[in-house]
Amino acid sequence: MYGRTNHCVYNINYHIVFCPKFRHKIIKGMVEDVVKQLIQEICNTYGYTLIQMESMPDHLHIFLSVSPTIAPTEIVTKLKSITANRVFAVFPNLKNHHELALARNHVNQAPPRQAVSGSVLTAVLMASGSGITQ
């Protein structure tokens, strides 16, 4: 699946893994449904092509394609910031238990304060944005 801009043809895919702090098993049931819906909405809003998304109770895999003009850190920032605030608005008890706090970021060719972990971009589900209703 190739994308095009005015001056290039590209196929840039990122595998992002979101993990709750201490890998608590909270991505299940209604939380899982809300998170998946939010990720899809964010991808549609910002023009990311969501290729595949799979969830486990303690982590979420997102495989997406983006334009070469968008930095990987920008993608993770948007996904984290919007998703966590909306999830906390719908499920306020999660924030009280600190289960979706920032644990760590691993980015290939990482900026300072981040570690390299192969070709997998790893992040934690923690963000801000406007809330949604149940």
Image (tube, rainbow, N blue to C red):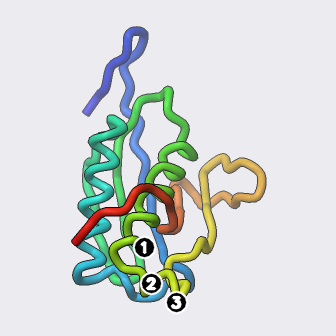
Contact? badges 2 and 1 (CB < 8 Å): yes
Q: Nearer the viewer, residue 3 or 94?
A: 94
Against 33, residue 99 (above or below) is below
Left or right, 10 with respect to 119, comes to left
Q: Nearer the viewer, residue 128 or 57?
A: 128
Looking at the image, which residue is at 72% across and 48% down?
A: 111
Q: Which image quarter is the C terminus in?
A: bottom left
Q: How dense is the environment of label 2, judged by Cα within 10 Å: few (below 14), some, or many (20 and up)?
A: some
Q: Name the quadrant containing residue 56.
A: bottom left
Q: Which image quarter is the N terminus in?
A: top left
Mark 2: which amino acid?
A: Leu
- Residue 29 is situated, as x and y percent measured from the top left of the image, at 23, 83
- Upstream in the sequence, badge 3 or badge 1? 1
- Residue 20 is situated, as x and y percent measured from the top left of the image, at 49, 78
- Residue 94 is situated, as x and y percent measured from the top left of the image, at 44, 84
Q: CA distance from mark 2 to mark 3?
A: 5 Å
Badge number at residue 94:
2
Badge number at residue 97:
3
Badge number at residue 88:
1
Q: Name the quadrant containing residue 84.
A: bottom left
Q: CA distance from mark 2 to mark 1?
A: 7 Å
Left or right, 15 with respect to 50, comes to right
Q: Secondary structure at mark 1?
A: helix
Mark 3: which amino acid?
A: His
Q: How dense is the environment of label 1, judged by Cα within 10 Å: few (below 14), some, or many (20 and up)?
A: many
Mark 1: which amino acid?
A: Phe
Q: CA distance from mark 3 to mark 1?
A: 11 Å
Against 44, residue 119 (above or below) is below
The count of marks equals 3
